[in-house]
Image (cartoon, rainbow, N blue to C red):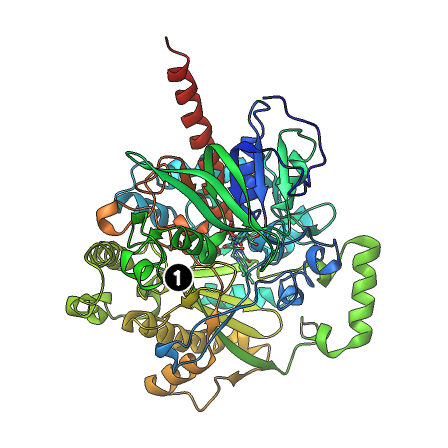
Amino acid sequence: TSIPLVPRFVSPDEILAEYDYVVIGGGTSGLAVANRLSEDSSKTVLVIESGPMDDGSDSFKIPYLGRGYLNFGTKYDWNVTTVPTESLGNRTIIMPQARVLGGTSSINGMQFARGAASDYDAWEELGNEGWNFKSLDKYFKKSENFTAPSEKLAEEFGITYDKSAHGYTGYIHSSFPRFLWPLLKNWIGSLKSLGHTVSQDPASGGALQLFWSPNSLNPDMQTRSFAREYYDGAQDRANFHVLVDTTVTKLVTSRGDKVKVDAVEFSRSAGTSEKRVKVKKEAVLAAGSIFSPQILQVSGIGPASLLKSLGIEVVVDLPGVGANLQGHVYIPVIYQMANVSLAAANLTTNATFYNEMYELYKAKQDGPFTNGGPNVVAMLPLSDITPDSPETFQTPSESLSHLEPSISKGYQSQLKILLNRLRTKHMAATELLWLSEGGIIISTMHPLSRGSIKTTSPALLSKIPAISTNYLSHPLDTKIAIETLKYTRKITATAEMQELGLVEVLPGASANTNEQIEKAIKDGSGWMYHMVGTCAMMPRDLGGVVDVELRVYGTRNLRVVDASVQPLIPAAHVQATVYAIAEKAADMIKAGSLWREYYNSMP
Ligand SMILES: Cc1cc2nc3c(=O)[nH]c(=O)nc-3n(C[C@H](O)[C@H](O)[C@H](O)COP(=O)(O)OP(=O)(O)OC[C@H]3O[C@@H](n4cnc5c(N)ncnc54)[C@H](O)[C@@H]3O)c2cc1C
């Protein structure tokens, strides 16, 4: 093909009639895959992204400001809310999801760590041959460019790391902020006094107990490092085109022995006429855990019962599309700190301090504005927080009778794997993060509750899908949350934390019995927004949506490469895993195309 050299941002009138690869969603995974596919200059790649390019403002760049919150509710956010959640007394939850080139990596909390080896080995045990920690390690490294903390910082705070566990040539910088809040030392001392050890480096597969997590942070500029770097790295390639402010509305398919995606339909905004671009080789779905299942569903690939109820023609009956939604619950425990003079809270209460620190950042890229999120993580196994065994809280299988048979079978397999591992020291049940504002965030890491994503309309642009998180609906998830909250009180009772003069404000002294704590948790919890599982990689008879090559079952040229393919959520904030999956996906797509070309060239 002769490819005209045009600017990377093309308009719908300038695009080619067909591309080898059409990547749907220019987010965390989409830009990573598109970059790698366009390394082969003989292949044309088009990325279609619903949002605009970011405006380069501080909210995208500066770690303290860019922890996401300034972009919530803006034009860079899909502004999504869940349906009322029965397990939370019918509360709805606001669910920020980026709508911008770079996707959710542009607005996330910048924590950058892998889960423990056991978390990924569980994927293989679920029937996904070749998907384990060892095989992903290469891709974790391929996506990463690690810089160790300065000797001074490492010595002062006791930061440990394993050089050999990291990558050094990837697009995403991982490093430590130049400034850490001093009261982290109290937190570390406290957990050590309770018998917890510090793991050398979470990247080597041992993300358990207490460890130091880097951020997705450019070490020189002290700015956010995000999927835009994959775009920047590819922008001079003539075979790489990007359509922004453009939403994919449907996959146009034809049937043979397997369904083929012939074209991708897109629209600039609701009400405008839809256009199509032809797919020569593959369509690559990277629209994230909410929108990838919706795009499949409106295109006729999903649970037949749902599709028929909306008058959508069934192209592939795939009950798992939109099922199996998992995430990490977010439970804040908030304190007043009587004996602390330097804490993150000063930035919100003292305008002079804020302005001085902002100027320090602008002048020297130093100080609290370099610090985005928690760098010390406690990932604790169940036996560290409660003597009770997980079996005590297992849901009886009759309660699954409402599920479609393959979904129920898949869920039972997941349950077995998780309950077995939750009994060991190799899988974390709970995460505790110390916020230097004066708070601990609790999160259940391997939830047994499952939610869903369902389109409510056959027309993608007319309605956001129904997001049902169902979190804390499984009794073990609630039990773990309650026990963890009780454990925070053991931590704050240690001499190291008592030095800070802590008084628990939320949920506070009135939440004492298990019942009172459960109510407080259900009233006050939110979500970490780590959504996975809605296009799960699993065998088809277990409710899987994609196979081990990330191909959608029943189709021949359609893959999903984003967060949604993770069948079980790891005990980690998931962006590092999303990048690794995308890197692996790109290699698989390239290898698939090489084989096809080899066979096509045979006489
Ligand atoms: C507020 C917040 C904080 C987080 N903090 C952390 C953290 O600290 N550490 C961590 O590891 N993880 C964190 N995460 C999670 C992590 O960032 C995400 O899991 C990850 O970025 C998801 O990548 P993705 O490729 O699946 O989706 P995304 O990056 O969301 O990409 C999907 C893209 O597809 C586009 N799109 C959707 N539908 C269409 C359509 N129809 N047509 C065209 N384009 C479409 C979207 O606009 C978006 O750009 C956080 C998430 C949130 C929301």
What residue appears at the point 39 percent right and 79 percent down from the top-left corner?
Answer: 88
Above/below status of 319 relative to 579: below
Visible residue check, residue 572: no
- Residue beneath the point at 79% across and 72% down: 353
Residue 155 image position (x, y, % from top left): 63, 51
Q: Ligand 1 within 8 A of label 1's CB?
A: no
Position of residue 462 in the picture relative to residue 422 (left or right): right
Using the rendered view, name the quadrant where residue 472 is placed.
bottom left
Task: Please identify the quadrant where the C terminus is shown.
Answer: top left
Q: Is residue 360 visible?
A: yes
Residue 138 location (% of width, % of height): 46, 34
Front residue (pair 168, 586): 586
**Residue type, mark 1 in image:** Met
Residue lying furthest front in this view?
A: 273
Instruction: Judge the density around disc 1: few (<14), some (14-19), many (≥20) Cα neighbours within 10 Å.
Output: many
Q: Seen in the image, is 372 located left or right of residue 118?
A: right
Residue 404 drawn above or below residue 539 = below
Of 559 and 95, nearer the camera is 559
Q: Which residue lies under the disc numbered 1?
A: 445
**Residue 362: % across, % down:** 82, 57
Number of numbered discs overlaid on the protein picture? 1
Of the 4 image quadrants, the one containing the N terminus is top right
Q: Residue furthest bottom?
A: 510
Q: What element carries label 1?
A: loop
Find residue 150 and report its horizontal and vertical position in percent.
Answer: 67, 47
Residue 326 figure quarter: bottom left
Task: Report the residue at 64% width, 60% height from top.
Answer: 76
Pick out the residue farthest to the top.
Answer: 603
Residue 318 is left or right of residue 520, and the answer is: left
